Image (cartoon, helix red, strand yellow):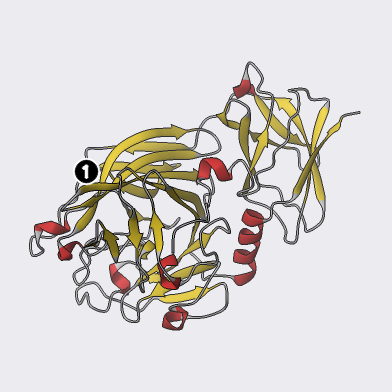
Amino acid sequence: MAFSKKPFSLSTISRVAILLNFFIVFQPSTAQQLVIKGGKFATYNSPVTVTINQPADKNHYGLYNPASKKTYALQWFTKDQAIFMLTDSIDASKEIKLSLKKISAPTSPFDIHESSAGLEIRLKEKPVFFYHTAISEPPTDSPSYYRRSGFIHPLYSPEGTVMTDDFPSNHAHQHGVFHAWTNNTYKKKHVDFWNQHQNTGTIQFKELVSKTTGPVFAELKTKQQYVSLEFGVVLEEEWTIRVYPLMDQFLFELSLEQTNITSDTLFMNKYIYGGMAFRGTREWDPFNKKYFKNNWNVLTSEGVKDSLANNTAVRWATAYGNIDGVMSSATVFNHPTNVRYPQKIRVHPNMPYWVYAPVIDGELSIAPAEKYKASYLYYISNTKPDNSSLERIDENWIHPPSVKVIAGK
């Protein structure tokens, strides 16, 4: 089956609706008000995107809520689009009014620390995650073909627990938060970008496109390459990772765009796994005799738990359990613009990893110059998954409340 549905990248999704993206135009005047009306669920702790005629001194304008007396900083990411973080609550079907206001230039709570190994995003000194730009070497007892770059590890919880694993002893090709296609055909030859021990393919970091910090978000844009060991680079993949300033929970979007840069079609064959993956901490790995402490748990949007969730279609899935004695959970939402939404997942029966795998339902393909796009939202906390909270986050992301501009009195 040729890939035909075209989900949007983060930059495109931000132009339609993602995480309360509202498209409005108003002049930089305090005489105008922004009215936001809640939807099916309450809305709070959510980034809001607005289209604004940018003031000359853009960094000195924010949005003021007279009811709560809070002022929200704005951060521009295009000439006329800005984001603010809504920390007041809008009850379901209720509304709040905001007005443009002159403010002191806000500071950024983020720091992107760059080293020879990669980049770490920190939020008020708390590490959120580390992205590997340099090639990471496998343990000395593992073959060199497991060398890898272009992935996230560690992924941290707000309490500082390490949610992910890297080069696990029984699956050294898995790495924290990573994306890979498994069973593929290219130029009539089998190529596996996931299982490096097959000696047919791998994935590697290419370049840092950009890094951004501001009062409302920090962002990395990176490029990876999907390499056939026989034919060379097949896909170029760009990640856009945008982190928002929540301290008690971490929230970030990861959008990917893959482009076939060759003159031949890549076929991603029907298979039981391959896609956007999460490898859990070594403390959840029963095969790691040194560090294993307790089993993990999985809960999905459909209420299915643990290994029973394997091969089921979900809107979100949470991996959770104790790490260093602290309850920690990582939820990943997939967006309706993603191909075959709600995507099916592979949940391993014994090891702590799961993956969004649209190839479970059949073949996909990326023709020359064609793009494959997908977007995911990550919510990391130190509590057990709460269905009502996760449904609210999902609803706020997918079905934002309505927005209009009215003239002030």
Where 344 falls versus 40 (above or below)? below
Q: Pick the residue in front: 244 or 223.
A: 223
Where does the image place residue 351, in percent across and percent down from the top left? 31, 76
Residue at screen point 21% across, 57% down? 201
Q: Is residue 32 left or right of residue 257?
A: right
- As drawn, the residue found furthest toward the right would be 409
Q: Could you tell me which quadrant the N terminus lies in? A: bottom left
Residue underneath mark 1: 134
Where does the image place residue 382, in percent across and percent down from the top left? 48, 63
Residue 125 visible to the viewer: no
Residue at screen point 75% across, 23% down? 27
Q: Amino acid at mark 1?
A: Ala
Q: Could you tell me which quadrant the C terminus lies in? A: top right
- As drawn, the residue found furthest toward the top would be 56
Q: Is residue 167 left or right of residue 240?
A: left
Q: Pick the residue in front: 256 or 117.
A: 256
Where does the image place residue 216, in percent across and percent down from the top left? 56, 38
Q: Pick the residue in front: 84 or 148.
A: 148
Q: Secondary structure at mark 1?
A: loop
